[in-house]
Amino acid sequence: MRARSRPPRSPRLRATLPWLVLGLGLAAATSPAWRPLAFGVSPSLDALLALRCTPPG
């Protein structure tokens, strides 16, 4: 019985994946700088918790 071999991955995907990961990491790391410019608000932690954790009623 022969073991099945995997089909080779696309070379374009292998070349693109590190750049995609780098771009996502850069966007996440710099989000405190561009988030107020993009969305216009910079809520505090207390404001975010008040939105998320308000009791029903």
Image (cartoon, rainbow, N blue to C red):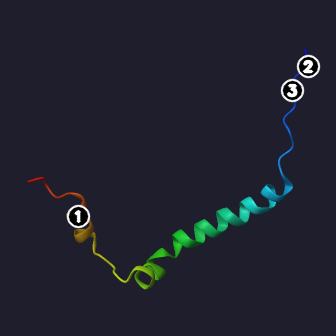
Badge 2: residue crowd in 10 Å (few <14, some 14–19, many ≥20): few
- Where disc 2 sits, the SS reads loop
Q: Is residue 24 left or right of residue 13?
A: left
Q: Quadrant of the N terminus?
A: top right
Q: Quadrant of residue 57?
A: bottom left
- Picture coordinates of residue 17, whole percent (x, y): 73, 59
- Measure how far apart labels 1 and 3 are at the Cα level: 53 Å
The alpha-carbon separation of the residues under discs 3 and 2 comes to 6 Å
Determine which residue is flagged by label 2: 2
Cα–Cα span, label 1 and label 2? 59 Å
Q: Secondary structure at mark 3?
A: loop
Task: Please name whichever residue, 12 or 47, is drawn nearer the observer in this view of the structure.
Answer: 12
Q: Secondary structure at mark 1?
A: helix
N-terminal of the pair, mark 1 or mark 3, is 3
Rendered position, 13 above or below 7 = below
Tell me what residue is drawn at x 29 percent, y 76 percent. 43
Asked whether, in this view, residue 41 is left or right of residue 53, the answer is right
Pick the residue in front: 29 or 55. Answer: 55
Question: Residue at the spot x=64%, y=69% of the render?
Answer: 23
Q: Residue at 66% x, 67% y: name it.
A: 22
**Neighbourhood count class around disc 3 (C-alpha, 10 Å): few under 14, some 14–19, many 20 upward:** few
Give the residue pinned by disc 1.
51
Residue 4, given in percent of the width and then of the height, sits at 86, 26
Q: Which mark is residue 4?
A: 3
Label 3 close to label 2 by CB (< 8 Å): yes
Q: Position of residue 37 (x, y in %)?
A: 44, 85
